[in-house]
Amino acid sequence: MDVQLYVYDLSKGLARQMSRAWLGTHIDAVYHTALVFGGIEYFFGAGVQTSYPASTHHGQPMEIIPMGRTELEIEVVLEYLESLKEIYTAEASPKGSQSIIQDLI
């Protein structure tokens, strides 16, 4: 099964345009990431969440990065995701979306 990393800009371009004026330094984006495999997008919101690819409130991804393939059965991946839901809760997320993506990869 193919695995893709979806990269979003939560500011929808505003960070790139206004960050220097607002923050005194330039930033390209306010990044959010999600993994897509098996026709489902997995991301951290208020805990581990799923959606159809590119159909979340984040809008369209600014970049889609192919991450390769996994030979794991979808049941194994879903079991691992279930175990992560105990760690990545809405109340106690270690680091947000990038952290859960690192654990999944």
Image: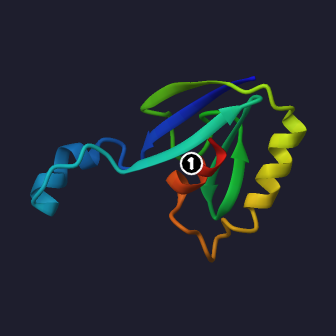
Percent across and percent down for residue 2 are 69, 22
| Residue 10 in sight | no
The vertical placement of 59 against 89, above or below, is above
Using the image as rendered, state which of residue 14 and residue 46 is in the foreground: 46
Q: Quadrant of residue 91?
A: bottom right
Residue in the picture at 42% in, 32% down: 62
Circle 1 SS class: helix
Residue in the picture at 62% in, 39% down: 35
* Left or right of 25 in this view: 87: right
Using the image as rendered, state which of residue 66 and residue 63 is in the foreground: 66
Looking at the rendered image, the quarter that the C terminus falls into is top right
* Left or right of 75 in this view: 27: left
* Left or right of 8 in this view: 89: right
Residue in the picture at 17% in, 51% down: 18
Which amino acid, mark 1?
Gln
Percent across and percent down for residue 39 are 75, 29
Q: Which residue is mark 1?
A: 102
| Residue 73 in sight | yes
Using the image as rendered, state which of residue 11 and residue 25 is in the foreground: 25
The vertical placement of 47 against 75, above or below, is below
Residue in the picture at 60% in, 29% down: 4
Percent across and percent down for residue 29 are 31, 46
